[in-house]
Image (cartoon, rainbow, N blue to C red):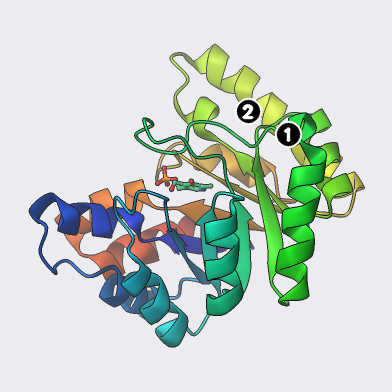
Amino acid sequence: MARLAVNVDHVATVREARGINEPDPVLAAGIAELAGADGIICHLREDRRHIKDRDLALLRQTVKTKLNMEMAAVSEMLNIAASTKPDLVTLVPERREELTTEGGLDVRANPEHYKKAVDQLKQEGIQVSFFVDPDPTQIEAAHEAGADIVEIHTGHYSEAHSESEARELFERIGVAVNKASALRLGISAGHGLNYVNIKRFKSLPLIEEYSIGHSIVARAVIVGFEKAVREMLELVRDF
Ligand code: PXP
């Protein structure tokens, strides 16, 4: 049975489209937890385009399951994480011009930088996850840098243009999962997963947790947040 962590960034994106105070990602997080979500995720970006410092602070006060803060490994965010103390930090690459996180961390390009970030976070008692492409060499580098968990980037799989491409990209995810398992890393997966393309993951029971945002928020507009979370939970709990 896999766990579901709900990313509430896109609730904040709708709020920011109007620049007012609703819908509130903090309220959405509470509803997600009442529906049974195992964790709440938010990404505090350098440009604060959706989640604000206020959201992170209130989520820290109100989340009762597990708060996962996605962030870039930069000193501003490391300081905010040290004072906020989320249960888990997921390090992600961040580029201002991207619409959403577009790829995994290139840990191999700068292992010392990431190791330093891990050391700082662990000193504060925060668990650390690395968002990486399904590339065994990056998973190995994440392990060497001290990551507790790797979150495998499923974005390319979810954007496959054909069944054969989806199958090939899914196989790569399978190889990455086996590598992470051999290294005894915690294993999560996320990005671009929805109520249809997640079904294939039933064949990868080593994945312990899924990080899902956009598809849940999109469904919530039609059926309500609680129902949207429950429907996704029903799928991942069957894995
Ligand atoms: N995992 C990471 C590291 C992400 O950056 C995101 C997007 O914020 C997600 C998971 C969730 O992706 P989606 O919104 O496509 O479900």
- Point out the image quarter for the C terminus: bottom right
Which amino acid lies under the numbered mark 2 shown in the image of this protein? Phe
Separation of marks 2 and 1 at Cα, in angstroms: 6 Å
- Point out the image quarter for the N terminus: bottom right
What label sits on residue 87 in the rendered view? none
Q: Is residue 178 visible?
A: no
Which x, y percent locates residue 122?
A: 76, 69
- In this rendered view, identify the residue nearer to me: 206 or 138: 138
Residue receiving disc 1: 174
Which x, y percent locates residue 235?
A: 48, 55
From the viewer's perspective, is residue 61 above or below residue 237? below
- In this rendered view, identify the residue nearer to me: 223 or 134: 134
Badge 2 vs badge 1, beta-carbon distance below 8 Å: yes
Q: Is residue 121 visible?
A: yes
Which x, y percent locates residue 126?
A: 69, 72
Residue receiving disc 2: 170
Q: Residue at x 62, y 67 (%)?
A: 88
From the viewer's perspective, is residue 163 above or below residue 33? above
From the viewer's perspective, is residue 145 above or below residue 158? below
